[in-house]
Image (cartoon, rainbow, N blue to C red):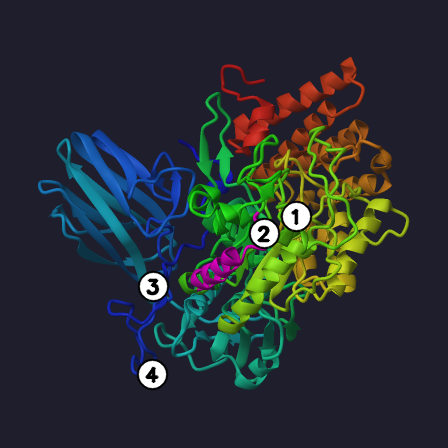
Amino acid sequence: MIRPFYFVRSLTVKFLAIAFVVAAGSCLAAESPEAHPEFVAGPLPRNGDFSRYQSHGRPAEWNPAVESGKHDFRLDPVATGREFLFPPSAAVIATREAGRAYYFQEVPLLPGEYRLQVETSGTVGATTQIVFATEGAEVTTGLMDLAEDWKRNELSLTVPQRTATIRLYADSQAGGVVRFRRVRIDSVRLKSSPVPFEDGAHIAGIVLPLDPTAAESFACYELQSYLHRMTGKTPGLKGRDHVEQRFLLYLGRAADTGRRSELNEQPADSYLIHSDDQGLHLAGNTDTGTLYAVYDFLKQQGCHWAFPGQLGEVVPERKSLQRVADRLEIPDFEIRGFHQLAQDFFPGPDLAWIYFNIDDQFDWALRNRLNALWVGGASLDFEAHRGHGWVQDSGHSFNASIAPHATYFKDHPEWYPLVNGKRMPVSDIPPQLPNQLCVSNPELRDYTVELARAYFRDHPRTKVFAMNPMDGPNYNCECDACRALDPPGFEWKQDFSGFPVFPNLKLPPLSDRYLNYVNFVAERLAQSHPDKLIEFYTYASREPPLRERVAPNVMVKYIYLTGRAVNVSLMNPHDSKAHIEQRHLAGWRDAGSRHLAYYNYGDWEHPNAPLFWYFQISDLLQNLHRHYGCRGLMGETHTQVQNDPVWYAVMSQTLWSTKTDYRQVIRDFCHSFYGAAGPDLTDYYLSMDQAILASEAGKRTDYHPNARWELSLEQLARGNALLDRALAKAGNDEQLKLRIDLVRLSHAILTHVRSQNETTTTQDIQAIGQTALKRANALRLDRGFVVKHPTARSLKPVSPSNAP
């Protein structure tokens, strides 16, 4: 099967955490091993620990191939459910009919010497063979008999070019099983040469600290890889490769101590770039900050990462590098996160799907100074070599991860809400969601304290434990102790008749009761885990508390979909919906919130349609930071990066610096990414932005941002003409055509959505919608573009037999 374009691997390959620790079997230093302990700085194959699941039970990144017989390819333990990240596993080839099959992966490598390690086991009688090959050269273990015990195998290979192939063979009779695990490539020695600057100076080599972290080693490899791709030259790593004693590049903790001290009191992930007589210094006050410094330096040389995968990457050819001015970079937001849907659907009648490539997502986020990604529940660990990122528990947790009713209701009914005199764990209101908890219950409170402590013991890297009310509609506890936590003077009537608007529902602000429970846990947690936080969604009540103060270690995450129009400023003094948000945010700020975060929404109904909400995200972030001291953003963005990469560029750059001019981001993005078509794409994005700003759709009484009424069909038609003009500028540049076709697909999807949401339907509108639908399906089929499930359903599956 031909995989869609943005599953083509980028040229950065996956590192296992073990590859960076000092351990027997690691790469030995080629020069002065006494001065430079053993370390590994080279690339490995992606998913070498088989912890990523693609679909159909198969490991991600590894392609299956059959020479003869019939075989099943899967993970062990078997991948089940809808998870795509697992503990390290084994890749299995199980033979149903005697024959030979294998996994293979092409790995981009810099010219140099490498060692491959693979562990194998299998049923008695089966054989395996490991092949490590590059153009003009191949090394192999030969056929090896297998046993149930694991055996480590090693191969060494000199790679003259940039690609090598790993093949893991299984040769067995029916019923035989062959297993592979811990596939790892170590750099033994790279072919190195100084990299010139325009002024005649050279980067003679790279210096790491004596005990490099996984991230510092990865930063070194990233620098070597991208500098080689730009200039054809690779600066060597001192202590392993040949390095001349001239101008050197010092990474991370190897950078000048005096200059690094400037980072000591700065927020996490701050970094500096500094040049002196000794060399160039790239360092952060965290591992992530050091990686940011490397990517910032590469961006100054013209590199650009527009969206995940190889198609989203710009790496210019250069004869020499530009000097970069000294700079100290400090983030305005501590949490810089986004949300993505994990499954991608192919064009075809059977809605076949595949999990998105999580490593591509991580790499893209890191290179754009984003530090949090979640797909629901806890945010994902970027892994050690990427500095881990912002790792936290999240999601609705009261009657879920804290006290799930299926587990605790039988023995502890008193933990669940008293409703009309009866303990009720689950709501009877459609869609029958779990109810809130009886948060005044002393036993529940003590249990939650111990649960939080145990969570941090078991997850030492996580920064936050979630204590978030459940999503509604559902019931709150009516017991006297819980009611006493509410502010007095309010009517209480849990009448959910009239679904879904509930006109008879009368409740007091509930923030005080739930914050009281959260504060109880937070105050005790601070004694044992003073550096940890508790997250508290404002889901059950957006109204700020009237009596409670927010504990210093509570992170309030403000969540409120007001329906404020996307072209209306958060600080608009005349907009009633903006005024509600202003009052809420000011109230939570004034209640003592030191860690205020914001849960933003994109268009969750149409994840493959472009947003164009550039003003909205820019205005939101600038005002949240300026007026309310907001320190984090991580909500439900939903829109896929590939379908509006400009929006993500605006978001990521504004999260880092709220002084960002979003229109300049658009201009710079299009110039860098779209080449000859850059001016037309600039006109396209700015015209969509201007049309949204001028729209009066927000005055509709039935307004909702997801309806996408801000852009008329006429404006979308003009936008489509700009894209056609841009495509004509691409000439024979197939990569540029593919990038523009992705924009055309997204635009066609939005046009179809907009036609479906038109208030009055005419034959002309129906024709516009059908034309857009046909264009979107044709692009999907021709280009192999994948989309998310809501889009796949709305576009209708296509196959060659019914393609437009």
Q: Nearer the viewer, residue 730 or 27?
A: 27
Of the numbered discs 2 and 1, the one sitting upstream in the chain is: 2
Of badges 3 and 4, nearer the viewer stands: 3
The amino acid marked with disc number 4 is Ala
What's the distance in space between the residues labelled 3 and 2, CA to CA? 37 Å
Q: Is residue 444 above or below residue 176?
A: below
Residue closest to the eye, 8 or 768:
768
**Bounds of the magenta span?**
437-456
Identify the amino acid type marked 3: Ala
| Residue annotated with mark 3 | 19
Is the C-beta separation of discs 2 and 1 under 8 Å?
A: yes
Residue behind mark 4:
35
Q: Secondary structure at mark 3?
A: helix
- Counting residues from the start of the chain, the first of labels 3 and 1 encountered is 3
- Mark closer to the observer (2, 4): 2
Check contact, mark 1 vs mark 4: CB within 8 A: no
**Please, what is the three-letter code of the amino acid marked with disc 2?**
Asn
Asked if the residue at tag 2 contacts the one at tag 3, i.e. Cβ–Cβ closer than 8 Å, the answer is no
Element at label 1: loop
Q: Could you classify mark 3 by the number of other residues whose Cα lies within 10 Å: few (under 14), some (14-19), or many (20 or more)?
A: many
- Dot label at residue 468: 2
Query: Could you tell me which secondary element the residue under label 4 belongs to?
Result: loop
Residue under numbered circle 1 = 539
Q: Secondary structure at mark 2?
A: loop
- For the C terminus, the image quarter is top right
C-alpha distance separating marks 2 and 4 = 51 Å
- Say which label, 1 or 4, has the lower sequence index: 4
Q: Is residue 609 above or below residue 485?
A: above
Which of label 3 and label 2 is nearer to you? 2
Looking at the image, residue 18 sits to the left or right of residue 540; the answer is left
Q: CA distance from mark 3 to mark 4?
A: 20 Å
- From mark 1 to mark 4, how far is it between C-alphas? 56 Å
